[in-house]
Structure formats: C-alpha cells, structure tokens
Image: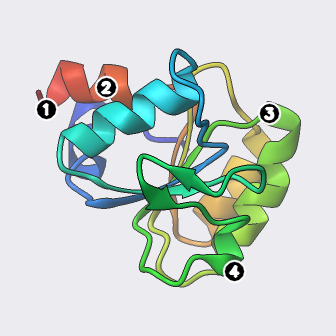
Amino acid sequence: MPVDTAEEIEEILEYETIAVVGCSSTPGKAAHDVPKYLLERGYDVIPVNPYADEIFEREVYDSLDEVDAEIDVVCIFRPSEEVSGIVDAALERDDVTVVWTQQGIRDDKAAARAEDDGRRVVQDRCMKVEHRRLAA
C-alpha cells in the first residue's frame, strides 16, 4: 500500500539523495522548480534526463542505470505510462529505498511491484508541497 501518512512521508523526507527522472532544464516547469527547491534545501539532487547535459550545474545522467552514486529516492517526473519502466530500472538497483511519483503521476501495478520488492512508494504527491507542509 503506497505511503500516505504524514509520519511516513516525514521519514522519507529525511533521506538525502534524490534521483529526479525527467528533471527539466527549463525554469518554470515543475520538473525544474521542484528539484531546484529540494537542492536549495540541502538534498543531493541527481538529474536524470537523456536530452540534457547539465542541470543546476550538475552532470545529468541519461538513465538510472548510469548513475554511479548511491540513490535513496527516485522521484519521477514522467507521464504515468512511463512509470513502469522507470520502476523496473529502480528495482535493478539495491540502493533505492523509495519510489516517488509526482503529483498527477501514478501506476498502481508498478507501485505494487516496488512494494513487493521491499521498496516504499509515494504516488501522486509533490515533494515540494510535502516538504513545505511537513519539514520546512
């Protein structure tokens, strides 16, 4: 069952390294502004986007499997129909503890696979909104 209590979300917000799949280089887009907010709050944000070379003066990875750093949370800014493949890539990694899909994004079957594999899942919630509400 996906995470939905304030207490569980607060625990997840204590993780430090967030790989943002679909991170955008375009200011004004949620996929840019939310990770920027997280970066400014001290999180280690790892941008993942095959169409960008640098975002926030950080190296951008084409996919999760190319990220050589440890990842705590995979935050997804891609359409719901792409979530399944991203979750599969996250499950290939031993370090990912949480899969988080941003507001308006969900895939219940992929979420169930992640939970069955022992990962925590947050769906259809904005990390910035939740951080402001619970941790700021």
Q: Relative to 75, is 59 above or below?
A: below
Q: CA distance from mark 4 to mark 2?
A: 27 Å
Compare marks 3 and 2 and give the one earlier in the sequence: 3
Compare marks 3 and 1 and give the one earlier in the sequence: 3
Query: Which residue bears the numbered disc 2?
Result: 130
Percent position (x, y) of residue 80? 80, 33
Q: CA distance from mark 4 to mark 3?
A: 20 Å
Is 101 in front, or is 115? 101
Give residue 94's mark: none
Labels 3 & 1 near each other (Cβ < 8 A):
no
Labels 2 & 1 near each other (Cβ < 8 A):
yes
**For this view, does 42 lie left or right of residue 80?**
left
Residue found at the far left of this picture: 136
* Residue type indicated by callout 3: Ser
Labels 3 & 2 near each other (Cβ < 8 A):
no
* Residue type indicated by callout 2: Glu
Indicate the secondary structure of the residue bearing disc 3. Answer: helix
Compare marks 4 and 2 and give the one earlier in the sequence: 4
Which of the 4 quarters of the picture holds residue 93?
A: bottom right
Compare marks 4 and 3 and give the one earlier in the sequence: 3
Q: Residue at x 69, y 78 (%)?
A: 65
Q: Residue at x 77, y 50 (%)?
A: 51
Give residue 92's mark: 4
Q: CA distance from mark 3 to mark 1?
A: 27 Å
Which of the 4 quarters of the picture holds residue 38?
A: top left
Query: Which residue bears the numbered disc 3?
Result: 80
* Residue type indicated by callout 4: Glu
Query: Which residue bears the numbered disc 1?
Result: 135
Instruction: Please rate how many residues cluster around mark 3, counting C-alpha atoms within 10 Å: few if below 14, some from 14 to 19, many from 20.
Output: some
Compare marks 4 and 1 and give the one earlier in the sequence: 4
Q: CA distance from mark 4 to mark 1?
A: 30 Å
